[in-house]
Image (tube, grey):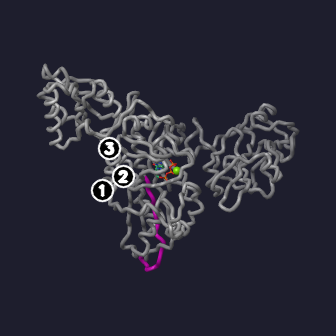
Amino acid sequence: MRFSKLFAPTTKDAPKDALLPSHIYLVRAGFVSQIGSGIYNFLPLGKIVLDKIRAIVKEELDNVGCQEVQLGFITPSELWKESGRYDKFGKELLRFKDRKNNEFVLGPTHEEAMVDLVKNRIKSYKQLPLNLYQINTKFRDEARPRYGLLRGREFLMKDGYSFHENDEDLKREYALIEKTYAKILDRLGLTYRAVEADSGAIGGSGSKEFMVIADNGEDDIVICDGCEYAANIEAAKRTKSILKDDEVEMQAGEFHTPDVKTIEQLSDFFKIPSEFFVKAVAKKAIFSDHEEIILFFVRGCDQLQETKALSICGALDFEDATDADLQSVGLIAGFIGPDVENIKVYVDGELEDEEMLICGANRENYHYVGYTFKDKEFDFVDLVTVEEGDICTRCGGKLSTTKGIEVGHIFQLGTQYSEALGATFLDRNGKAQPFVMGTYGIGVSRLVAVIIEQHHDDRGCIWTKESAPFDVDIIVSNVKDEVQSAFAQKLYEQLRQKGKSVLLDDRADRFGVKISDFELCGFPLAVIVGKGLKEDKVQIVNRKTLVKEEVAIDKIFDKLMELV
Ligand code: ATP
Ligand code: MG
């Protein structure tokens, strides 16, 4: 490709709302442009990168026996109603009607559509397992589309779905796809961790997210310094810390605590550390058909992990409960304790055997001292947010937190969708069984931005080997110099003949413009054909290190063949 013909409108101006390097550089370097909130056009350079990522994903998946299909982007609402997700998915699901009043959704994910495709077509266990995937546009009406390609409303996803006769075979496939995802991310040159994810009712090792480590990540992940354990903060577990009860003395009973409401105030008032207090977190839980106040109790020094709390109570969302909301169910903010009537209560599992605690007395200006959870009939569940320095449940190592961007998610789904949609096969005993399913996603367009989040400097993009739109940028320093032009042209042709992807910067611009475009666009190597040619020399620039190296013209071809 000749730069003079390339549609790559580079600019010095960053988009006004752009905060992250990937957003700024991908727009400035002319890889993408925004056409609407959360909707992006891919220009030629961006499209090359997108297609390269897509090709790597496809190659690795096809290698392990997955088959590519392409489903309609638009899905009839009927299927979503059958699965029960039409109401549950909330506002991210964009619904619309056609001229005949038929209802549709813009596909945000395709479990329903894929089950429908397989239903009545795969009839026997003999046709299983089957793993189908597509690399296709998705639409989610995200509440806050931002960060360019990282959180768009329209984006490209690889979504795969596997069908099995039993759990054991699903687990085998799940492990295989986990390995395959690792290969894909390795090839893209990314540093990542596969972390345990929140998977609602399914739990445990049923779901993993692939997190690319990045300072600007939206996800908090917990990693252990002693073993392989890594988890999303939404699912992270820790070892319970032992309270030193013998250090505090308490006389059981109600205690007058006028206007003392927060854990901090209480800790000051009683001169007792915050771990001995029970903190009530009241939420207004939103369900599809009603709202309800739910109480969550954690230790005074801990924070409620909202995603854990949401999956436990099955609500769609939480809102903070106002004092008025609390009053309406007979609760007094600042003095709420666990012994309430007609209100759903969940208690953090670490409190289960505790005996010497202080909690609200459910009476204004009173707390209860010496409260015990022992032998009480509460729902004891994991509710806390793991923090830096907590102890790993597996090896006793220290846990630390870091930021990540989710690029992939693999999930042992089970029979949830096949049952809802009545998709069955005949098992070895001739009995109809619902398919056991797995689902696997990769954010293909998000990966374009993620590569830059992890690989950039203050001059621009630094593409990794397999993601770079071109391997080499041959810069003609002065196009009016016929010797320079002729030499560059010849090198360009030679490399192209060998199948290398080469850009020839033959623009009439100043050298400074060309080198800064090279740096902004982030091709791995540049060859500068300039004044040195008179002494039979050209320069190679490494984009990552910015190191320049002089190379004799009779060596340059071999040298590039070796590097690229
Ligand atoms: P997130 O928590 O980031 O919203 P998600 O859990 O909703 O992601 P999945 O439903 O598991 O994501 O989708 C699979 C993959 O699709 C994600 O791992 C991510 O890489 C990508 N993805 C999801 N939402 C978006 C988006 N709004 N823009 C770009 N890529 C996305
Ligand atoms: Mg999402």
| Amino acid residing under circle 2 | Thr
Give the residue furthest to the bottom.
430
- Disc 1: residue Cβ within 8 A of ligand 1's nearest atom: no
Instruction: Name the secondary structure under disc 1.
Output: helix
Q: CA distance from mark 3 to mark 2?
A: 28 Å
| Residue marked by disc 2 | 180
The answer for how far apart the CA atoms under marks 2 and 1 are is 9 Å
> Nearer the N terminus, badge 1 or badge 3?
3
Q: Quadrant of the C terminus?
A: top left
Residue 41: give x, y in percent of width and height: 40, 46
Marks 2 & 1, CB-CB < 8 Å contact: yes
Residue 550: image quadrant is top left
Please, what secondary structure does the residue beneath circle 2 have? helix
Is residue 316 or residue 165 the one in the foreground?
316
- Density class for disc 3 (Cα within 10 Å; few <14, some 14-19, many ≥20) is some
Which residue is at a point 63% across and 50% down the rendered structure image? 382
Name the residue beneath numbered marker 3: 44
Q: Residues within 10 Å of mark 1 (few under 14, many from 20)?
A: few
Task: Identify which residue is drawn at 36% across, 62% down.
Answer: 69
From which residue to which does the magenta span run? 427-441
Measure the alpha-carbon separation of dots 1 and 3: 28 Å
Instruction: Between label 1 and label 3, give the one nearer the viewer.
Output: 3
Mark nearer the N terminus (2 vs 1): 1
Q: Which residue is mark 1?
A: 63
Amino acid type at image mark 1: Asn
